[in-house]
Image (tube, rainbow, N blue to C red):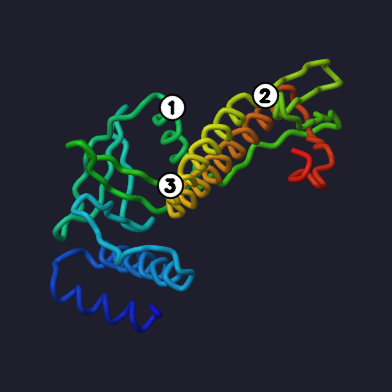
Amino acid sequence: RPNKTSHSQLYSYLKKKTTIPSSVLNEAVRLIRSRWITFCKQRKQHIKTSIPHFKNTVAIGFNNQNWSVRKDGCKYSIGFPINGSKPYFELALSDRQKDTLDRLSTAQIKIGNGQLLERKNKWYFVATLNFSESEQTTGDNIVGVDLGLNNIAVCYDKEQGKTKFYSGKEIRFHRTRYASRRKSLGKVKKLDCIRKSRTKERRWMKDFNHKLSRRIINFALKVKTGIIHLENLKNIRTTA
């Protein structure tokens, strides 16, 4: 099982073989260890898997100390270590992305880890940004949230008499589609594909719930409420 000693040994071995900057090499070693640990866990659980392999297009990882953003006029550039230097490359940004980067100078956002990747002859830099300030409202106004099936959530602001419905059609469509696919796979005994389908459905549902919660919060901010009251979620799995 990989540990700190194996990390150090692997790092020392690769350091002798490459000229990759130490920080980038460290991130690569972490990725290798992470994939290997996952592989070992899957084998213990008797899940069909294979030894991890990495393609030439695998993302290059950077920690928050190895890359930076620089503003030149109205344009932004990103810099990261390459062959002992740190060149900067101009970014192609949407208006929303520019607005986000504008907040870097106000200390409202701090940069996290980043990844450089290539897809279809285009280069992308994906990064996490840590928001140090959260949106807060004050007041005694309450927004009630009721959960259902036809409408996955209904928000009601009694003070202003505003109601917001969030349809559950998208969830029903995806659940029906995944269930139908698993039924077809079950007839031909493709158990691995069935497990992957369940995992994929859980990931989609988690992403949907995250986005829905953000929309509910945005509604509460819009009506300037200070409290969000949810219905009792006890036994929600057996009733939904």
Q: Quadrant of residue 228?
A: top right
Query: Taking 114 as reference, is 173 left or right?
Result: right
Residue placed under numbered mark 1 in the picture: 96
3D distance between C-alphas at marks 3 and 1: 47 Å
The numbered disc on residue 166 is 2
**Which mark sits nearer the N-terminus, 2 or 1?**
1
Q: Residue at x 33, y 48 (%)?
A: 68
Q: Give the quarter of the figure containing the N terminus.
A: bottom left
Secondary element type, mark 2:
strand
3D distance between C-alphas at marks 3 and 2: 37 Å
Residue placed under numbered mark 3 in the picture: 188
Secondary element type, mark 3:
loop
Q: Residue at x 43, y 27 (%)?
A: 96
**Which mark sits nearer the N-terminus, 3 or 1?**
1
Front-lying residue, 122 or 154: 154
**Which mark sits nearer the N-terminus, 3 or 2?**
2
